[in-house]
C-alpha cells in the first residue's frame, strides 16, 4: 500500500487508522530520513491504540513504554543515536521482541536490521516537499 499525505494531520490520521487495527505481538519497523513523518505517524498510531499521553520521540532514552488497556505495552523505540547494531545490546530489545502482549514501533529500524524479528511490517517514509510525505506500507 502507498499513500501520499499532504499535512501532518493526514499523516497522524493514517497512523491512527493503522493503530485501531494493531493487535498485541505486532512490530512495525519504520524507515525514513529526518523530517519524513515517522514521529507524527506514531503520534496518530498511539491515539488509535487509545493512548492519551503525549507521544515524544525517545531519541535520548531510546525506548518509551506506554501502558495499553486492558493489558500489554506499546513500545516506541527511536534508534537515531545508534551508530551500529552492537550498541543495541543492553537496551532490552530482545525482551520486547519476545513479549506477546507488546506492540512495538521502531524509528530508524535500519540501524538494527540484522537483529529485527522476521515477523514485522515495514513502513517507508519519504519527504516530498512542503507538507507532503509518501508512505509505503509493506
Image (cartoon, rainbow, N blue to C red):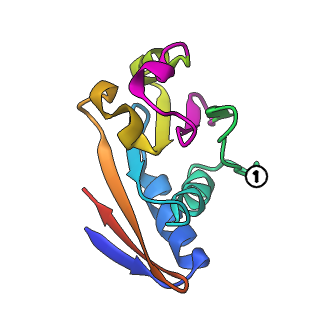
Residue 27 seen in render = no
* Residue 71 forms part of the magenta stretch: yes
Q: Which residue is drawn at 60% across and 76% down?
A: 9
Q: Residue furthest right?
A: 53
Residue 17 seen in render = yes
Residue 77 placed where, x, y %?
A: 55, 37
Q: Residue at x 38, y 32 (%)?
A: 112
Q: Is residue 39 above or below residue 88?
A: below
Residue 47 placed where, x, y %?
A: 62, 56
Decide: few, some or many residues near mark 1? Use Cα within 10 Å; few <14, some 14-19, many ≥20. few
Q: Which residue is drawn at 46% across and 60% down?
A: 33
Where, by quadrant of the figure, is residue 78 drawn? top right
* Residue 73 forms part of the magenta stretch: yes
Q: In which quarter of the image is the C terminus?
A: bottom left
Q: In which quarter of the image is the N terminus?
A: bottom left
Residue behind mark 1: 54
Left/right placement of residue 34 relative to residue 122 reads right
- 116 or 71: nearer the viewer: 116
Residue 95 placed where, x, y %?
A: 47, 15
Residue 18 placed where, x, y %?
A: 43, 58
- 74 or 130: nearer the viewer: 130
> Which residues are drawn in magenta?
68-90
Local SS, label 1: loop
Q: Which residue is drawn at 61% across and 33% down?
A: 62
Amino acid at each position: 500500500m502507498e499513500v501520499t499525505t499532504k499535512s501532518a494531520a493526514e499523516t497522524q490520521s493514517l497512523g491512527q487508522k493503522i493503530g485501531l487495527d494493531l493487535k498485541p505481538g505486532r512490530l512495525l519497523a519504520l524507515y525514513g530520513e529526518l523530517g519524513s513523518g515517522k514521529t507524527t505517524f506514531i503520534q496518530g498510531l498511539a491515539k488509535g491504540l487509545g493512548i492519551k499521553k503525549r507521544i515524544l520521540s525517545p531519541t535520548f532514552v531510546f525506548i518509551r513504554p506506554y501502558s495499553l488497556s486492558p493489558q500489554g505495552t506499546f513500545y516506541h523505540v527511536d534508534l537515531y543515536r545508534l551508530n551500529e547494531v552492537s550498541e543495541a545490546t543492553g537496551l532490552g530489545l530482545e525482551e520486547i521482541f519476545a513479549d506477546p502482549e507488546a506492540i512495538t514501533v521502531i524509528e530508524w529500524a535500519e540501524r538494527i536490521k540484522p537483529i529485527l524479528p522476521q515477523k514485522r511490517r515495514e513502513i517507508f517514509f519519504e519527504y516530498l516537499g512542503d507538507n507532503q510525505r509518501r508512505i509505503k506500507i509493506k
